[in-house]
Amino acid sequence: MELIDQYFPDLTADQRDKFGQMGELYEYWNARVNVISRQDIDTLYERHVLHSLGIAKVQQFRPGTAILDVGTGGGFPGVPLAIMFPEAQFHLVDSIGKKIRVVQEIVNALKLDNVRAEQVRAEKLDDSYEFVVSRAVTRMAPFVGWVKKNISRNSFHDRRNGILYLKGGDLAEELSEIKEKAQIYELSDFFTEEFFETKKVVYVPL
């Protein structure tokens, strides 16, 4: 929690309480269903919670924003972002049912009434959203193909609706495969931990 407080000092008591509960909840559920790697449980707040919140350093979601988290796995980045933006609505999807069941248990325990978790492939979704978030589930070109149809035409942020994607490494070749002009934000500009040296948020307007 010290990490979260360090970078997000203006949290409400309720947000601090929810972030504080995450460690114990993930330890409990990960022992039963492996949703994140065993060694990462010890670095949950740095490598999962804070990493997810890198998106919050790039984009503040206004009340009423609809956000889709594709390939949420154990609930990242969707669960930390839902705590950070309680007035936005989050739809967390994954094709693996046991992961979604864990996410649902954690969402219930945290009393996150702005989150819906569902076992479904992104390609099958018909709903529309202002933003799609994800954490490196595939290369950008197929990902854009999956979700482009789901981006709402109703844009009410300063930044146009689109994708906010957590990625690492050299992305030049991958981003050359899409026609949209991506913007890259280095997470090392926001967080000093070594883990974030090569980590980025990629914004693709759609």
Image (cartoon, rainbow, N blue to C red):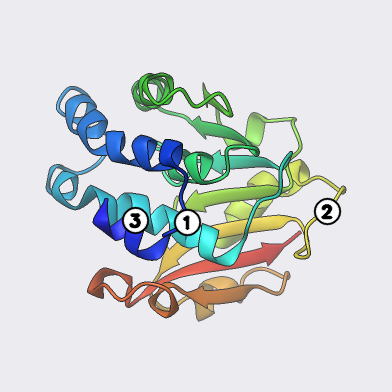
Q: Residue at x 63, y 57 (%)?
A: 60
Mark 2 residue type: Phe
Q: Position of residue 89 (x, y in %)?
A: 64, 34
- Pick the residue in front: 94 or 142: 94
Amino acid carrying mark 3 in the image:
Ile
Q: Tag 1's secondary structure?
A: loop
Question: On residue 121, which mark appears?
Answer: none
Residue on which disc 2 sits: 156
Q: Which residue shows up at 34% across the image and 23% down it?
A: 102
Q: Which residue is mark 3?
A: 4
Q: Which residue is mark 1?
A: 10
Q: Amino acid at mark 1?
A: Asp
Q: Are marks 2 and 1 in contact (CB under 8 Å)?
A: no
Direction from residue 76 to residue 140 in the image, left or right: right
How crowded is the residue under tag 2: few (<14 C-alpha within 10 Å), some, or many (20+)?
A: few
Q: Nearer the viewer, mark 1 or mark 3?
A: 1
On screen, 47 above or below 36? Answer: below
Q: Nearer the viewer, residue 151 or 64?
A: 64
In space, the residues marked 3 and 2 are separated at their CA atoms by 28 Å
The Cα–Cα distance between marks 1 and 3, rounded to whole angstroms, is 10 Å
